[in-house]
Amino acid sequence: MMSSNETSEVALASTNNYKVYRRRWFLLATLFVLNISNAMVWFTFAPVAYKAAEFYTDPPNVDTINWLSVVFMITGIPCGIAATWLIDTIGLRFSIILSAWLNGVGCVIRVVSAIDGIAPSAKLPLVFTGQIVAAFAQPFVLFAPTKLSALWFKEDQRAISNMLATTGNPLGMMVANIISPILTNKPSDMLYMLAVQCIPAGVAVVMATFGWWSSAPPSPPSPSADAESESFLVGLKALARNRQYYLLAWAIGGGIALFSVLTTLLSQILCPWGYTDSYVGVVCGSALIGAGFVGSAIAGFIVDKTKRFIEVTKLCYALAIVALVVFAVMHNKANQWVVLTCMCGLFGFFSIPVYPIGNELAVETTYPVGEATSSGIVFMSGQLQGLVLILLLQSIGTNLDPKPTTDKCTSENLGDIPVQDMSVPVYVMTGYGGFIALVYIIFFRTEYKRLHADKCKNESEESSENNIDNEAYIKENHTDKVATI
């Protein structure tokens, strides 16, 4: 029985008694805030690497600080396996509350690492511990959007809800790129910066703990939400037999990797050619992610209305690679501020929508496999490809002789580390992205299995209702005739 409160929450009921609840928007907001906070933790130190190195390491070592971001990629794979099982087996409520607390505790440990009374030798281990604890939460917050969309939203709201939850991640990266340098004018400001970044983590903990009452609504929003997903192990076996899913996981994961690599190495790519840290972080970074947020909203709306997941992802992939090619050609030329900003914006506009829509496409390709399982493996593929690409590209850069433009690099973030020409790595990254796009566009085909199941179930129920109406009509006419006789 539904309580009066739950009944009042019903926002819409279909003719087949499938219902959606206003509470779903609060759950979506919780996941959005949690994604923002976790991404801020991930990219906290990247824009202030040199100041962080001076504060946490003796002698200052920027490579050590870089590992504070890399641990997210490393933990993403083993923790991703656990997250897929927990979300699909135990449920959303437990998984989201767990991830909110992991993220919040990680943030608090980071703050403790910057307190004046802490021994200098303990600061670095503490900040790494905080990063790792928060990194454990990342797979949960990135795998949950497809499950939330499937269980709480109608068919024509799934893509847009998935987009809103997922794009909290790049939005959090953008916020970190902007506020970390603003709040950290000198190394001694580290405590203040880390304390401020605890605020969204605390908000997410409160929202998840006191606002997430159940994993699923009292009544499902669609036929597919009413159906049981396959068990975790059965789902993995089904994925292993699905050849199109292999291609999709590689392609969408490759898109995630390209975005992660470009955002991670953007400063190293541009600074040797005279582009300042503030231009790279604030202008290019904001253009990349801000445009991606807009592109995701537009693409999500289009997909919800047209259900053309394949066509939209292929078009976005192709245009993102075109923008990346232009960026690769122009990045090592001085004074190309406008062109590079536009290319970063275009790359973000077309590349970021590939992930949330690709997640929905993964569910369509693999239904009735659990949503967290199918989208989680896509994410783990992206983390693995991103980690390999970053290590590879950093190893093939070539040292540059000092010149006026390289002074931009050594002014703040890189200290005495030799400046590298990253042109060859950029060409390799672009070539890899182009190869993935070409293979995906030519060879990927799939049936929309979840949409097909929804359609068949709706048609079946409508047919049953029509049969009941016909039987009632015949019975009524028969009764009238008998009465007349």
Image (tube, grey):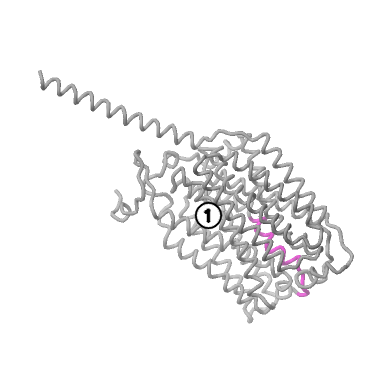
Residue plotted at (25% across, 25% down): 471
Compared with 243, 390 (above or below) is below
Front residue (pair 114, 181): 181
The location of residue 392, given as percent across then percent down, is 78, 52
Residue identifier under label 1? 165
Residue plotted at (51% across, 49% down): 160
Res 423 seen here: yes
Res 234 seen here: no
* Residue stretch rendered in magenta on the structure: 58-75
The location of residue 405, given as percent across then percent down, is 83, 67
Query: Which quadrant of the figure has residue 104?
Result: bottom right
The location of residue 376, given as percent across then percent down, is 58, 47
Query: Which quadrant of the figure has residue 191?
Result: bottom right
Residue farthest to the bottom? 117
The amino acid type, in three-letter code, at marker 1 is: Ala
Magenta highlight on residue 74 = yes
Front residue (pair 261, 136): 261
Residue farthest to the right? 401
> What number of labels is visible?
1
Residue farthest to the top? 485
Label 1 Cα neighbours within 10 Å, binned few <14 / some 14-19 / many ≥20: many
Specify the quadrant that holds the C terminus. top left
The location of residue 460, given as percent across then percent down, is 39, 30
